[in-house]
Amino acid sequence: MSYRYEEQSTPPEAQRVTDVAVTTHQHLFEVDPRLMQRWVLQQEFPNWDSLRIMNSRHDHLEWMHRHFAYSVVAGSELLADVEAGGDTDTTTTGGPT
């Protein structure tokens, strides 16, 4: 097994998705690094590590929900509530504070 630095550390050409988001690998979206350079030191990740992080995001989210969420609310429910002018204060749901 060999490690090819250029092959492993140079992501594919970024494709602009919106004015603030880019994608490099399929289904991998990120804030355009140029917008963050002023505040955040940019780190280079090997391609395999970026893909590993992306592919494990659902496992991580499930773990967070199991350990910290009293309830899980879909974004569409929140948007519908906001559009209806309802109360979006989630601190009164009876969950841990």
Image (spheres, rainbow, N blue to C red):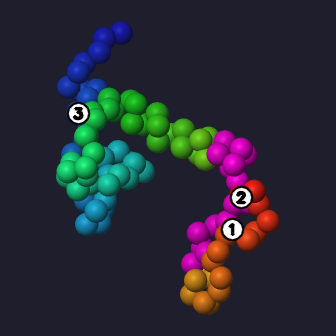
Label 3 sits on residue = 10
How far is mark 2 from mark 3, CA to CA? 44 Å
Q: Amino acid at mark 3?
A: Thr
> What kind of element bears circle 1?
helix
Where on the picture, by quarter, is residue 8?
Answer: top left
> Would you call the spot at circle 1 few (<14 residues within 10 Å), some (14-19), or many (20 or more)?
few
Judge from the rendering whether residue 55 lies leftward or rightward of residue 70; answer left or right: left
> What kind of element bears circle 2?
loop
| Quarter of the image with the C terminus in it | bottom right
Q: Amino acid at mark 2?
A: Thr
Residue 14 on image: x %, y %: 24, 49
Residue 77 on image: x %, y %: 64, 75
Judge from the rendering whether residue 10 lies leftward or rightward of residue 46; answer left or right: left
How far is mark 3 from mark 1, CA to CA? 44 Å
Where on the picture, by quarter, is residue 7?
Answer: top left
Task: Name the residue at 47% across, 37% down.
Answer: 53
Label 1 sits on residue = 91
Q: Residue furthest front?
A: 97
Task: Name the residue at 61% across, 47% down.
Answer: 61
Q: Is residue 72 magenta?
A: yes
How far is mark 1 from mark 2, CA to CA? 7 Å
**8, 72: nearer the viewer:** 72
**Above or below for 31 versus 81:** above
| Quarter of the image with the N terminus in it | top left
Span highlighted in magenta in the image: 63-79
- Mark 1 touches mark 2? (CB < 8 Å): yes
Label 2 sits on residue = 97
Q: Earlier in the sequence, mark 2 or mark 3?
A: 3
